[in-house]
Image (tube, grey):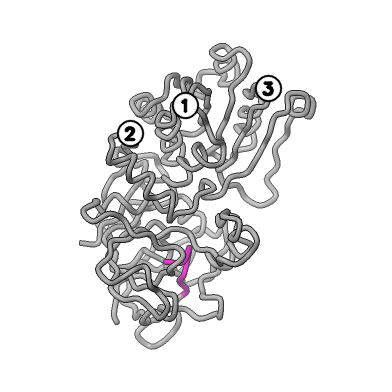
Amino acid sequence: MDIRAAVVEASNRPMVIRSLTIEPPRAGEILVRLVATGVCHTDATMWQQGVPVPLPVVLGHEGAGIVEQVGDGVTDIRPGDPVVMSYNSCGSCPTCCSDHSSYCHEFFPRNFFGTRPDGSAALATSDGSPVFANIFGQSSFATHAICHARNTVVVPEGFDLRIAGPLGCGILTGAGAVMNALQVRPGQSVVVLGAGSVGLSAIMAAKAVGATTIVAVDLNPERLALAAELGATLTIDGRTDDPVARVLETVPGGVDHALDCTGLPAVIQQGIAMLGVRGTCGIVGAAAPGTLFQADVSHVMSGGRTIRGIVEGDADPKRFIPQLIALHQAGRFPFDRLIRFYPFDAINDAFHDSESGVAIKPVLLFE
C-alpha cells in the first residue's frame, strides 16, 4: 500500500515527506496506522549520524496508532487494537530471557540497522528502490509502520493516543530509571540532572513512589519552574549555582540517588560527588562512543557507591507502559504536560523546537 513518510536522505539536509510503498506484515509483524509519534533526541542523533544509520531512512520510535493488519503467529494483538510501539528485542538471548530486554544482545541490530534480521526493508520508493526502516522496530515517522509483536503494547480503549507515543521511549526511560533501575523507595532522596522530557519524567516518577527530597538541576529557568510544579522540592540553576554544594547543603550526608540525563562527563561527575553512602548514580544520557568521565576512586569505594548505565528505564514495555497509563489516569503522572503538538508536515519545525528548547516533548499528529 502507499504511505507518506519523512525520509532522511542526508545528515545535513531537512527530512523530506515522500510517498512510499509498505509491505504487508510478515510472520510476527503488525501493520499500524499512526495517530501520533513523539520526537526524541535519539532521532536527531541518528539523523546527524551521531549513531550511524544507513541512508535513506525513515526514523521515529515513539509511535502510537491503530492496528490494521497482523501477520501469521500474532495472537494477542488484533486489528482495531490501539497500541503504543516501543524498542525492539530478540526475545531469546540471556538478558531477554531474564526479563531485561532493554539489554538485548541484539539491541543495536534490531533497533538501529534499518532492516529486518534477514536484511530486508518493508519500505520502498515507487520505482522499487528500498528505503531503510525498522528503526526501533517501527520507523514511525510515517502514516503507517511495520512493527513486531514483541515491541507493540495494547493500551486501554479510550486512552488518548495523541499523547501515548512518548510512553514507548522517552517517558518510559525517565520513569523506569527511577522505578525499575534505581528502585527509589518512599522517603529517599533523588537528584535529576537535566530537566528535559526524560528528566521531568523521572521527577514525576520520584514523586509518585514517595521520594521526599527531589532535586532538579538544569540551565533553563522555565524547565526548572515546571520541574517544581511536577514534584521537585528543590531546583538548582547550573548557570549560577554549584549543584554539588547546594545538594550537600540540603542533604549533608549526600543523596540516595542521582540520575544523569545529559551524557555530559562534567555533569556525571557532579552526580557521583553528590552521592551518600551506598548511593547510586544512574546514567541515561547518551554520549558519543569514547566519551570518558572521571570519578574519585576513594569516594566510590569507601562509601559503597554505585555507578550504572540504564537503557530504556530497565523496562519491559508490555508491563511498564500499562503501569504508567494507570498512574496517569489516577492523576499521579501528568506526563501530558510535557507535550507540544505539531502536524506531521511540520516535522522539521518540531525537531528545531526540540533542539532549541522551545518544546520539551514534540509530538507529531497524522490527522
Lateral position of residue 287 relative to residue 228, left or right: right
Residue 363 percent across, percent down from the top left:
31, 51
Residue 34 percent across, percent down from the top left:
29, 64
Give the structural element (helix, strand or loop) at label 2.
Answer: loop
Q: Which residue is drawn at 33% across and 57% down?
A: 37
Measured Cα–Cα span from mark 1 to mark 2: 18 Å
Give the structural element (helix, strand or loop) at label 3.
Answer: strand
| Residue at the spot of label 3 | 277
Magenta run includes residue 136? yes
Which circle's residue, 3 or 1, is located before the other in the chain?
1
Quick one: 238 or 182, which is closer to the camera? 182
What amino acid is found at the position of numbered circle 3 in the picture? Val
Quick one: 163 or 243, which is closer to the camera? 163
| Residue at the spot of label 2 | 332
Magenta run includes residue 56? no
**Residue 216: numbered disc:** 1
In the rendered image, which quarter contains the C terminus? bottom left
Q: Residue at x 29, y 57 (%)?
A: 36
